[in-house]
């Protein structure tokens, strides 16, 4: 039977989770070793140079493109892209937004499939009272969440503009006036920019730097609203996660937002005041990506349903 090898990021990022889930659920059609596979899946495309060239030359190569930050897609980035493109047989874009970006730079076939979502990790919690006590959150406040990094790794004073933390701040300023007692929940590393800005504008917050999946799902379930204010995104997976655990969410038109969210939940910086969460549509749209069904289209893409 045809088998696939997935390369790894090794950065404790979402790609590494996808890789673990794939090997856990699809071990019978996967190989832990590139030499024993008929296909190479560059699920972490920026690590392609770690692959042996002979494998890239001799095997079918599928490359996932999560997103292209065109503000940073300089000559060096393009040189790397086209060097890798020579080995790629088919591209996997995780959203239509990414496919539209990618099609500017390659003539290779592009398949669009959002990544799967694990409902053993992300789910709705109906009795929430103990969560507010556990995390010492004010249950009389309007809780707004942001669980992604917002600061550049090389300079913790500079905002990571692709993630739109400056836009998030403008939205929070609006909610500070329109809602009573707003309280922001932040998680993850490199939140320096938002922490500083929230202090400046006088908005209360809780910051949980290190969280596991269980804790993150619990924090989602505490929220009155999750805001994606990014300029460029691959996923973000928070859209899937909010959809599955029925967390109210609004988002800029990035990544998989159009595939999952209602049009009324998608905003830009001129109309964000009118954006409204639609829990039902987000929940319904995410169902086809649940494990194990969420693997089906990937198996077809990888041509692993046919014996060699």
Image: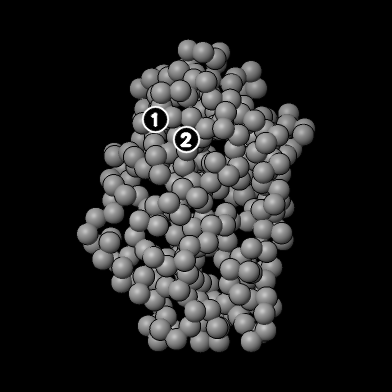
Most foreground residue, 12 or 104: 104
Choose top left, top right, bottom left or bottom right for residue 200.
top left
Q: Reading the chain from its start, which is encountered first: label 2 or label 1?
A: 1
Q: Is residue 155 above or below residue 174?
A: below
The numbered dot on residue 252 is 2
Can residue 216 be seen by looking at this rendering? no
Q: What residue is rendered at 45% in x and 18% in y?
A: 174
In the rendered image, residue 211, in percent from the top left (x then y), is placed at: 56, 46
Q: Is residue 136 above or below residue 101?
A: above
Most foreground residue, 125 or 37: 37
Q: What residue is rendered at 41% in x and 23% in y?
A: 270
Q: What residue is rendered at 47% in x and 66% in y?
A: 109
Q: Is residue 169 left or right of residue 209?
A: left
User: What colour-coding does the image apply?
Assistant: one colour
Quadrant of the frame with the C terminus:
bottom right
The numbered dot on residue 191 is none
Most foreground residue, 44 or 11: 44
Can residue 41 be seen by looking at this rendering? yes
Q: Is residue 240 above or below residue 31?
A: above
How packed is label 1: few (under 14 Cα within 10 Å), some, or many (20 or more)? some
In the rendered image, residue 71, in percent from the top left (x then y), is placed at: 29, 47
Choose top left, top right, bottom left or bottom right for residue 126.
top right
Q: What residue is rendered at 59% in x and 50% in y?
A: 212
In the rendered image, residue 82, in percent from the top left (x then y), is placed at: 31, 68
Q: Residue furthest left?
A: 75
> Number of marks in the image?
2
Q: Which residue is mark 1?
A: 167
Tags 2 and 1 in contact by the CB under 8 Å rule?
yes
Q: CA distance from mark 2 to mark 1?
A: 10 Å
Disc 1 secondary structure class: helix
Quadrant of the frame with the N terminus:
bottom right
């Amino acid at each position: 039977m045809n088998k696939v090898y997935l390369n790894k990021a090794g950065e404790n990022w979402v790609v590494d989770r996808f890789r673990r889930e794939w090997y856990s659920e699809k071990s019978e059609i996967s190989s832990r070793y590139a030499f024993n596979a008929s296909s190479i899946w560059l699920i972490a495309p920026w690590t392609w140079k770690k692959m042996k060239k002979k494998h890239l030359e001799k095997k079918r190569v599928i490359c996932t493109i999560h997103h292209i930050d065109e503000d940073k897609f300089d000559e060096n980035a393009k040189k790397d892209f086209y060097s890798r493109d020579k080995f790629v047989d088919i591209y996997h874009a995780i959203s239509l937004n990414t496919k539209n970006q990618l099609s500017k730079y390659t003539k290779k076939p592009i398949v669009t499939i959002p990544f799967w979502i694990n409902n053993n990790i992300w789910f709705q919690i109906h009795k929430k009272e103990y969560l507010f006590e556990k995390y010492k959150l004010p249950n009389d406040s309007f809780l707004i969440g942001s669980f992604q990094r917002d600061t550049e790794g090389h300079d913790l004073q500079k905002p990571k503009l692709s993630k739109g933390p400056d836009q998030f701040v403008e939205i929070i300023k609006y909610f500070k006036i329109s809602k009573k007692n707003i309280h922001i929940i932040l998680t993850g590393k490199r939140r320096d920019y938002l922490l500083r800005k929230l202090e400046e504008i006088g908005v209360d917050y809780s910051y949980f730097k290190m969280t596991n999946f269980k804790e993150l799902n619990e924090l989602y379930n505490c929220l009155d609203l999750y805001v994606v204010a990014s300029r460029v995104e691959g996923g973000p997976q928070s859209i899937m996660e909010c959809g599955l655990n029925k967390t109210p969410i609004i988002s800029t038109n990035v990544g998989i937002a159009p595939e999952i969210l209602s049009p009324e939940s998608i905003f830009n910086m001129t109309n964000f005041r009118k954006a409204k969460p639609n829990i039902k549509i987000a929940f319904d749209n995410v169902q086809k990506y649940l494990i194990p069904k969420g693997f089906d289209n990937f198996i077809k893409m990888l041509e692993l349903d046919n014996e060699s």
